[in-house]
Amino acid sequence: MRDFSRRTILGAGAAALATPAFGQAFPARPIRLVIPFPAGGPTDVYGRLYAERIARELGQSVVVENRGGAAGAIGAQEVKRAAPDGYTLLFGTASTHALYNLVTRQPQYDAAKDFVAVAELGGGPLCWLVHPQQPGTLSEFLAAARAAQPPMAYGSPGTGTLMHLATEILKREAGGVQINHIPYRGAAPAMNDLVAGTLAMAVNTLGAGLPLHRGGRARMLAVATAARAPQAPEVPTAAEALNRPGFTAVLWHAVFAPPGVPAPVLARLSAATNAALSDNAFRAQLADAGIAASQPGTPESAAAFIAAETARYRPIVEAIRPELAG
């Protein structure tokens, strides 16, 4: 079996453009992009597409390393400890940088102080899927869950992730139905158990869930978008299925570096990212994967976006803290 946990993505002309020492030109050697979730999940999919594209812009190799566990905290801590030279980056998410310090009782890092944002990249809306033998609509599934003994279980990429938070909100909006949470090291392992019938329900992004839904290996009950997704118009939004207007949830992604990265290096990484986000072919490639890319921005605009998202989620987390602790 091929090992996808570590993969080198080569930039065009890397050998010709590389220089022997840092300071002569950046980047002068391969860049390491840490993805804090296992291979195969939505963050891994976007991270690899991003790495491949910016490698072309930078003219240097980008090495993708999956460091899953603790809802992304293990990979984040590894980047936190790295040298602030721009050669180690984190492909973070709403879970690692908007929610982590809100939901973790003893956090191992400060999402705002221990990283500098390079760019906000966009992402994909969440969806809820069930095993094909489960009821066909969200209301029918919730009714079955209320009657189930022992309780049904759902899987998420980990305690404190956006997927976990959104599902607990969904349960509360549905009247407090009991569906036990099973945390995994990433979205892909949870989906494997869903397809195998070990789980009744799992939460993922729309792009990751669509192939299973279309192939009949899982059934998508609802998507956390404001309007029905054009990729699956037969699937209702969570807002309409629950009659709760405004229920949306998007797993956004962003790139981070350790604080103290030299300004020219940060600017180079930002420029490479903006060049990628400005490319229509790259944006179309992301759209095919169910990812809505952000518009080009600056490190400052990325930091402001993440701060605003953290502030937006704070009262939501406080409202359902007992459910998250459970």
Image (cartoon, helix red, strand yellow):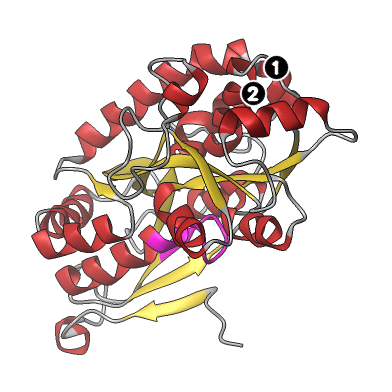
Q: Does the magenta-highlighted stretch encompass residue 41?
A: yes
Q: At x 52% / y 32%, what residue is drawn?
A: 110
Q: Label 2, label 1: how many angstroms apart (C-alpha)?
A: 5 Å
Q: Label 1 neighbourhood size at 10 Å, few (<14), some (14-19), many (20+)?
A: some
Q: Identify residue type, mark 2.
A: Lys
Residue 29 percent across, percent down from the top left? 30, 77
Q: Position of residue 64 (x, y in %)?
A: 43, 70
Secondary structure of the residue carrying numbered label 2? helix
- Label annotation for residue 171: 2
Question: Which quarter shows the N terminus?
Answer: bottom right
Q: Is residue 262 above or below residue 325?
A: below
Residue 88 visible somewhere in the drawing: no
| Residue 153 lies in the magenta-colored region | no
Q: Are marks 2 and 1 in contact (CB under 8 Å)?
A: yes
Residue at position x 18%, y 60% in the image: 284
Task: Locate residue 123: give its quadrant.
Answer: top left
Left or right: 154, with 88 as reference point: right
Question: Please, what is the three-letter code of the amino acid marked with disc 1?
Answer: Gly
- In the image, 220: left or right of 234? right
The residue under label 1 is 176
Q: Which residues are magenta?
A: 33-45
